[in-house]
Image (tube, helix red, strand yellow):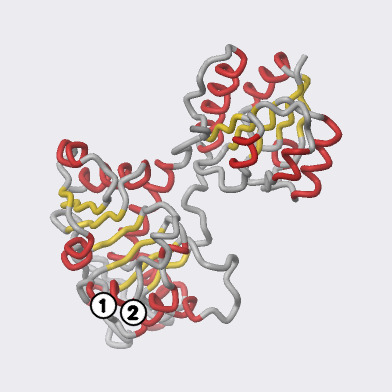
Amino acid sequence: MEKALLTCKLDQEAVNKLKTIFDVTVAGAALSGDDELPEAQLEQLVTLHQPHVLIVDSSPTTKAVLAASTALKLVICARGTPNNVDVEYCKAHNIDVCNTPSRNANAVAEFTLGLILGITRSIPQSMAAITSREITLPESELSFNTKDVTWQHTSLPFIPYEKYKAFELAEATLGLIGLGAIGLAVAEKAKALSMNVKVYDPYVDPSKVRDMGLELVEFDELIATSDVISIHAKETDATQNMINADVFSAMKPSAYFINTARASLVNYDDLLKALTSRTIEGAAVDVFPIEPLGHENALIDLPNLILTPHIGGASRNVVSHHTRMVMVSIDQYLRGLPKQYSCIR
């Protein structure tokens, strides 16, 4: 019986099935719920158990880890992009690598729409005005008129109904930079909200964009004409800092910027300046160059910015999504078939 080392969460039914196929060692997140194993600990486990199949999530699966098993034939990384796996080493040593593409695409797309609604309608800001007691009153000043209430009083610093007025998303223009799995899911949801969707992606099939009722445009046009801009590009040398001071300056002053992709795509110093100077109206970001943020990070105090702690893909359904793809790869491995989710080309 071949051996498998499992260090990521899978649905229990799948774990039980794996145990009927392999001599399975369960460790790391698969055992304790921790996010990842340190490289040294994973290397020790691989050395000890000599697996034929290694199933990981975000644990650093380096050359040292991979070389620790002379039996290794297949690595399955339960992530959309197996950045933590030394794929080049695997190529050179006839080890196949599979991933689980788009496992959290819908989760991130839903979250992106949530951020768009949140920042354009000032949902967190208006809630903060209540919870900070900025627009609440002492009990002695409360009015008990319950007809046609609009939350205003002479003692309040502003009228919420006026301060938080916003444009509706219907008929507004959403600009998407990148139309991969997540960008595509965002586009579909935005169309359902009657948004006009423009796309910049030099690698996408134009007919695919047209068939969806989207408009394929050049980068400069998207930046200059969109009411909301959401980036979903891949992290490459070419896309690093692609959103910078020049790009923010070219946006509408009323525009909002969303990043649920990768921090490296955006110059965050330039984002800070654009928000502070009101070069753009606002932004919402889920990813940062250094995580967690430091206590003194200047972004934290900006009133026109929504910050979330890299939770766009934090869906309870993601494990089920990647479990299905892991088991497809296992089935194809056992049957000697080409693997649908192989990263080795």
* Badge 2 amino acid: Ala
Q: Residue at x 28, y 67 (%)?
A: 256
Label 1, label 2: how many angstroms apart (C-alpha)?
A: 8 Å
Q: Is residue 222 left or right of residue 19?
A: left
Quadrant of residue 57 within the rendered picture: top right
Q: Is residue 251 above or below residue 83?
A: below
**Could you say which is closer to the camera, residue 185 or residue 81?**
81
Q: Is residue 80 left or right of residue 227?
A: right
Q: Is residue 209 above or below residue 290?
A: above
Q: How many marks?
A: 2
The quadrant in which the N terminus is found is: top right
Circle nearer the N terminus (1, 2)? 1
Residue 321 rendering spot, x and y as whole percentages: 50, 32
Q: Amino acid at mark 1?
A: Ser
Q: Residue furthest top?
A: 335
The quadrant in which residue 282 appears is: bottom left
Q: Secondary structure at mark 1?
A: helix
The residue that disc 2 covers is: 274
Give percent across and percent down for residue 12: 65, 26
Name the residue that disc number 1 marks.
Answer: 249
Q: Are marks 1 and 2 in contact (CB under 8 Å)?
A: yes
Spot occupied by residue 124 in the image (x, y as percentages of width and height): 40, 67
Q: Nearer the viewer, mark 1 or mark 2?
A: 1
**How many other residues sit within 10 Å of disc 1, few (<14), some (14-19) or many (≥20)?**
some
Identified at 81% across, 38% down, the residue is: 45
Residue located 15% across and 40% down the image? 210
User: Residue 33: x percent and y percent?
Assistant: 70, 43
Q: Is residue 228 above or below residue 39?
A: below
As helix, strand or loop, the secondary structure at mark 2 comes to helix
